[in-house]
Amino acid sequence: MINKTPLLNRLKHKSFAWTLFILLSFTSMICLFIIGIYTYALLLGPPSLSTAQPTIYFSSDGTEIGQEKTIETRDWLELEQIDQQVIDTTIHAEDKRFYEHNGFDFKRMLGATMINLRSLALEEGASTITQQYARNLYLSHEKTWSRKLKEAFHSIRLELFYDKDTLLEGYLNTIYYGHGVYGVEAASQFYFQKSNSDLSLAETALLVGIPNRPSYYSPITHMKQAKQRQEKILTSLLKEGKINQSKHFLASHEHITVYEKHKGQVKNLAPYFQDIVMSELQSILKKDIQTIRTAGYRVYTTLDQKKQKALQTAASESIPKDSELQVGAIVMDPTNGATLGLIGGRNYTKSPFNRATQANRMAGSTFKPFLYYSALTNGYTATTTLMSQPTTFMLENGTSYQPSNYNGYYADKEVTLAQALAVSDNVYAVKTNLFLTPERLVETAKTFGITSNLKPVPSLALGTASVNIKEMVTAYSMLANGGKSLNPYTIEKIETADGEVIYQHEPSKQKQVLDPQATFILTQLMTGMFDSTLNGYMHVTGETIASELTNVYAGKSGSTKSDSWMIGYSPDLTIGVWNGYDDNRTISKTVDKQAAKNIWASVMEKSSDGKIDSFIAPKGIVAAYVDPISGELASAYCTTSRLMYFVEGTEPTTYCSMHRPHD
């Protein structure tokens, strides 16, 4: 019988040797890796401790309108200037062994892991002050493994090259305390309107507790949670003998006054506009958002403060406070494309979604000018007549389509283009679209710079396509400037923090894209929406605001069940306004339906200062007084007449046959 014991012993010994070899190899690899990390950190040299400078935005007149939020603070204090009570309480709450470890508290990490495993939740954190400072200086706050690894590496570098007091000073001056406030002194002034050296123990504990979860422990919005965090810190100080029972009792029961309104706190003007500026900055500088925010750029924008404030005020006054109706609006200089004002909603804090540029909504009748521009370049004149009556159109695919006019009103006779546009006759529009073809309308809209998806269908003439405010205002601005190309922009100049100009807007070379004669005639026709002489079977669509206007403007309103638009212009200014609900519900209240027109009229009048230039006719245009009903030259017997414009040779030559003297 063979004795297997020696063989088994040899196998066990060999297995043990291999296990030991693997363990030693693994340990050696870890040691080499750690040595390599520290060597690399040493070779890189000391990391910069300079705090970021915020990028600042200026309006067109050079006034600051806002700045990006960064870890920069204007209340930097040296460590000796920070109250010892604040320092001790911060260290106790955030990193008790700060002066003992080398950037990582492994004992605390293990304890936090055990607590989180027992609770099956992330209740306890283990980041040291060094790690938090590294995160503030160099990283975002995203919760990813890659960010954690970078944080660890930056912590090693900080600990290698700087002493603890330097790190603590930097931490206390850059830590985030909520509500856009960084640094202990700025936070003390923000919440208590006093210096950190004047804080009581109760106030100190409340303040120190905030950075753990700034939004959750904000004493302004969540005092209950803030007090719970404060009590946890005070109890911990008591247990470790940092304070006595008497101080704990007094601090726990002290009434604390937290200020919700802050002196000298400047609200950013036009936050939706500033978001557009940031997008343009990214395109110009080819850098990421975080880099731009903290580079200290001085960005001089196109924003006109007067027009922006007029826009915001008009929106606030025209929409009831208890209404959920939303708004998007843009004010543009049609001569160069500069965005002078913009709102993307009623409350940026509640909803930063920009309805002026990001929301695509059905255009309604504001789409008709594109149709009638195409008509004017294909044989139509201001006096071209078509029958206005209920009409069912049989389409090539065998289906039928029956558009309807507002409230079912029809002339039941022929009407002119001038009147059809002024009262927004839908039957006239669809007839014109089918005559010219929907495909031609799509191409015309593209000529105007419309980039949204457009389907060549009969109803496109009535604005069934979804578009955004920016492209519509830009298109109307091309009508305002006589048909020239336009590239909207928001930035005039960019300077570095040192004042070096690194970008200056250069006006783009404008091309004549639209026919100048058709453009001018269409503009004159679009003034008709405010002219009561064009009233007939329906009232002109701008009648409700016509009395508020002191100048001649061209415009077009539009509405669907869930959208209300008003876009109009002078030679110097284009304004587009949209109203609707975010959930696309029907606009049923009259005040909500009227809001877009009211906002537009208010801003246009306040912006013009009572003086605007006139639209200049190009060569080859003639004018004639025409009876708006018959479309013929007005005679002495016509009750109304309107000055209309024509390409020379296409004007009416006969006098009105509808209004003659009685025999």
Image (cartoon, rainbow, N blue to C red):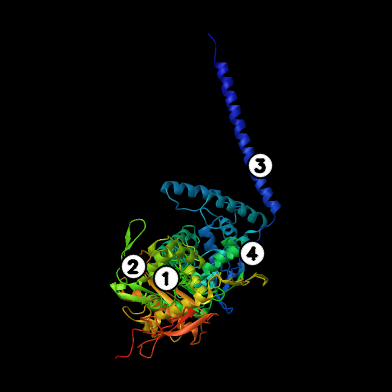
Q: Of tags 1 and 4, which is closer to the observer?
A: 1
Look at the picture and state if 5 lies above or below 248: above
Q: CA distance from mark 4 to mark 3?
A: 32 Å
**In the rendered image, which residue does mark 2 sit on?**
561
Question: SS of the residue at dot 2?
Answer: loop
* Sequence-wise first label, 1 or 2: 1
Label 3 CA crowd tier, 10 Å (few <14, some 14–19, many 20+): few
For the C terminus, the quadrant is: bottom left
- The label on residue 368 is 1
Dots 1, 4 in contact, CB < 8 A: no
Q: Nearer the viewer, mark 3 or mark 1?
A: 1
Label 3 element class: helix
Q: Are marks 3 and 1 in contact (CB under 8 Å)?
A: no
Q: Which residue is depicted at the point 64% across and 38% down? A: 28
Q: Amino acid at mark 2?
A: Lys
Query: Mark 4 or mark 2: which is in front?
Result: 2
- Mark 4 or mark 3: whose residue is earlier in sequence: 3
Question: Nearest the camera: 530 or 206?
Answer: 530
Lower position in the chain sequence, tag 1 or tag 4:
4
Q: Which mark is residue 49?
A: none
Report how far apart the C-alphas of labels 1 and 2 lie in the structure: 17 Å
